[in-house]
Amino acid sequence: MVALNMKGLLENTAAEYTALTERLAGITTTASDVFTNAVLIARVNYQINLTGGEQISGVYETADIAGFRSGFSRLYSMCR
């Protein structure tokens, strides 16, 4: 009985992990798209010369929430 409970717990944990991983991938993709658009808008509206986004490229290297937060912060400071 204990083995069956452990098996069920492991299956649920694996299913939850898979769902979370897929959701996180979707969030990362959306954040990347939003950031790309923000860079384009900054180029046009603030005449910021970002050739290849060299000053904010850390976002694309890490592709995580902290990287996007840092990238948006740097972009914001450039547009002030």
Image (cartoon, rainbow, N blue to C red):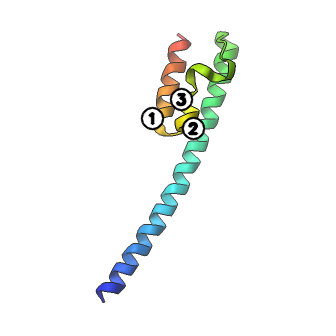
Q: Are dots 1 and 2 in contact, CB under 8 Å?
A: no
Horizontally, residue 41 falls left or right of residue 67, namely right
Q: Are marks 3 and 2 in contact (CB under 8 Å)?
A: no
Which secondary structure, mark 2?
A: helix
Q: Provide residue 73's location: percent of width, then percent of height.
A: 48, 22
Residue beneath disc 2: 31
Image spot of residue 15 (x, y percent): 48, 68
The label nearer to you, 1 versus 3, is 3
Which numbered tag is attached to residue 58? 3
Which element carries disc 3, helix, strand or loop? helix
- Say which mark, if any, is on residue 66: 1
Say whether marks 1 and 3 touch (CB < 8 Å): no
Give the residue displayed 33% in from the left and 85% down from the top: 3
Query: Which disc, if any, is residue 45?
Result: none
Q: Amino acid at mark 1?
A: Ala
Residue type pointed to by label 3: Gly
